[in-house]
Amino acid sequence: MPDPVVKAITAPTIAVLGLGHVGLPTALGFAELGWRVVGADDDQDKAARIRRGEPPFYEPGLADLLRRHLASGRFTVAPTVRDGVREGDVLFVCVGTPQRDDGSPDLSQVEAVARTIAKDLNGYKLIVEKSTTPVRTAEQIRRTIRRYRNGDHAFDVAVNPEFLREGSACADVLHPDRIVLGVDSERARDLLLRVYRPLLDRLPPERVVVTDLHTAELIKHASNAFLATRISFINMIADMCEATGADVTEVARGMGLDPRIGSAYLRAGAGFGGYCLPKDLRALIRIGEDLGIDVGLLRAVEEVNRRRTERIVRKLEQALWILRGKTVGILGLAFKPDTDDVREAPSLKVIARLREEGVLLRLHDPWAQDSMRVVVPEDPPRVTYCASAYDAARGAHAVVVLTEWPEYGDLDLARLAALMETPVMVDGRNLYDPAAARAAGFDYYGVGRR
Ligand code: UGA
């Protein structure tokens, strides 16, 4: 027997509060599934851009989805977050959770949105935590709403972690490999299942996890921490390969053929960056410490990752001896391909180190130059942004590959080498075949390659 409140909501309106890298693809994904979706964001400039059909960041397929659903009328952007709260029946909280200096997440945006929701309750609402937040945040959201609640309207809080990756966010939202729902009432469960019905119809039932709130929150923490662990593990093996003359790409391939291991997240290189893996790992370390749990394993994962960029600088020193006054071209600034995001990108650390050493930098990225310029302004000849990878290599003593953009894979390596003062390549993403790079004239340094 469905709950009467759920039954009364015949076609729930979905409100997505916070239109960033998670919120906007989520909102448009629900619109694509047929729901009416209202998005809202405190950043008025961002909201206005989205209303005009301009995605505020680069994500493959996002511009098309946005145009389509603004035109279909299924997606609108509310004038304020308060309006979004009032219009929605199911409210997905997708606000940012930046990091404080001590590594713990700053949850002030989550708290602020919970207070806004509380004050604007105008009927039953299901509030769904989608931002990645520490375990037990859902409980705090509930307490906050109770404390500031307008009237005695009923509400539920649920947890629905998001597993989308930047660069494939739209595809991930529409074709998830799993759906995790943390609920503690029948009403919340029924409503969330209703909202996800179009996806559930396509997903094998074992890929849907309906569980309690804390477990759902921990599934997200554990997933990101495990991905980070795999990457640091293979990076440690890469160092062993370098010391012994083995090849890490073949080690990873050999390991990955074991179905218990699998081949994903075993690419050695410059380490993991981005807004999620490093921050979530630090948050989990903090949570563990607060709970008195030994999180040495996670600290080691972080430490291995911290050292990745230093190894890249060492390789440059090995090749060039003295770095001061040399010119280095950096190919790839984004933390990974298909995004213009440079948050916690390995490139930031490498650039900072090389600037300290007095290296003249020529930077290129197909999409992320504008976002990098904000944090590392153009300052020729110390920092020069270049129109192409070839331009970045011109007159350089070395090039360093930090993002494996597919278009870099298509470069004419002989042409690239010919443009350089000395053709040295440090391939921080193992993008090139070492033999091919050497045949093109490069003194080639990969990561854990023979
Ligand atoms: C990550 C998770 O993969 C998503 O499932 C999760 O939803 C998201 O965080 C989040 O919490 O919001 P994302 O930050 O987009 O997604 O990045 P990933 O594709 O996981 O890559 C992270 C970093 O690891 C990148 O710098 C990438 O270059 C690096 N990486 C990845 C490796 O160095 N080796 C690998 O084998 C894989």
Image: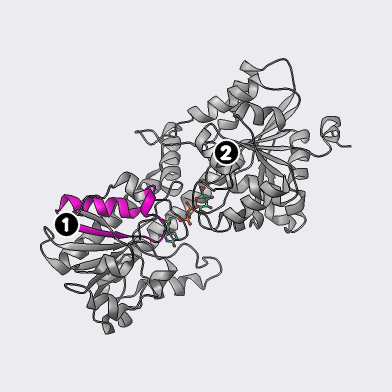
Q: Amino acid at mark 2?
A: Cys
Q: Amino acid at mark 1?
A: Val
Give the number of the mark in front: 2 or 1: 1
Q: Position of residue 338 (x, y in %)?
A: 47, 60
Q: What residue sits 35% from the left and 33% below the top?
A: 102
Nearer-N-terminus badge (2/1): 2
Quarter of image, res 418: bottom left
Q: What residue sits 76% from the left and 24% below the top?
A: 123
Quarter of image, res 325: bottom left
Residue toward you, 329 or 312: 329
Residue toward you, 53 or 310: 53
Quadrant (top left, top right, bottom left, bottom right) of the N terminus: top right
344 magenta-colored = yes
Residue identified by numbered label 2: 94
Residue identified by numbered label 1: 359
Q: Position of residue 256 (x, y in %)?
A: 49, 70
Q: Are marks 2 and 1 in contact (CB under 8 Å)?
A: no
Give, as a single range, the part of the protein colored magenta: 343-371
Residue 409 vs residue 61: left or right?
left
